[in-house]
Image (cartoon, rainbow, N blue to C red):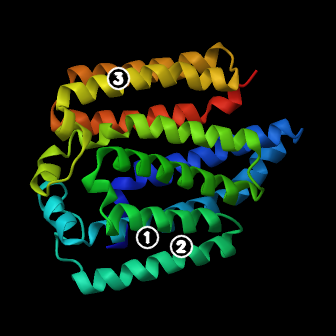
Amino acid sequence: TLWLFTYSDLKTMVIPSTAFALFNGYAKFSSDSITSGMACFMLARRTPFVLIWAWVNCLAFNVNNQRRAWSIEEDRINKPWRPMPAHRLSEPGAKILGVTAYSTALLVGSVVGGGTIQSAFLLILGYLYNDLRGGDKNVFARNVLNGFGFTSFASGALDVAMQFRTDLETLSWLLLIALVVSTTIHTQDLYDQAGDSAIGRRTLPLVIGDSISRWMATFFITIWSWMCPFFWRTTAVGYLLTTLLGTVVCLRLLVKRSVREDKNTFILYNGWLVSLYLLPLFAS
């Protein structure tokens, strides 16, 4: 049951944030003149803790997101296999689990050696997104909350991996990632339009139209595919990596428009995000 709460967001929260921590951690260790072998050893030793932190925080957010009556109604249409529409857990039981999961997430940071501040921030974002329905009522708020949510996951995972205070360069990079996600994350709303419409959720595809939202995502993915390598002053490999993956995502957004294809495109979109996370490794 716990696994099913998090299953659909492993590709959006747990795996990308872990990748961010490992790639950016390796780049940071390298800049501190730590040998490649030693950096790999240090990160490999911390990887289980990163995964635990990311998954527990993903569970806390998702339980509190999926236990609401309107979320259950949506999931009956979009994701009927989830625990609540599948009647694997009662609403009172899910409420208790949600409180327990958030409490556990806050405690996990002290056990794994980092990410406590980010867990607290994710709790606040979760309250705004789920309890106040900030993710349902306002398109701008929904995208911004998603942007800072992704960044909090990435920052927390990096904190667990490296156990150091964020420096100015890393903070600037995290803010840029927040901007990237805020302007492109509506790609995840393209395949959920039926369920979102049923509960009155205001997402970009429903508010401005499916076609316009696709072109908007295409525009920003193209821009960020160039701007992010420029931020790191990468070699040509960095530009090539993000541009190629970004182009694939953009073409699919414009050509492949079925629900099934949009789900596959969103998986590739997350791959594109991970390619951005790789960029510090190619900094010149």
Residue at 29%, 36% in the rendered image: 264
Residue at 36% across, 85% down:
96
Report if the CB atoms under discs 1 and 2 are less than 8 Å apart.
Answer: yes
| Above or below, 237 relative to 14 | above
Q: Residue furthest right?
A: 33
Label whose residue precedes the other's in the sequence (1 or 2): 1
Q: Earlier in the sequence, mark 3 or mark 2?
A: 2
Residue 41 visible, this orientation: yes
Q: Position of residue 152 (x, y in %)?
A: 55, 54
Quarter residue 256 falls in? top left
- The relative height of residue 93 versus residue 69 in the rendered view (above or below) is below
- The answer to whether residue 36 of the structure is visible from this angle is no
To which residue does mark 1 refer? 60
The vertical placement of 162 against 230, above or below, is below
Where disc 3 sits, the SS reads helix
Label 2's element?
A: helix
Whether tag 1 and tag 3 are in contact, CB under 8 A, the answer is no
Left or right of 279, for residue 243 = left
How far is the residue under mark 3 from the one under mark 2?
A: 35 Å
The residue where tag 2 is placed is 105
Q: Which residue is mark 3?
A: 218
> Residue at left 20%, top 41%?
191
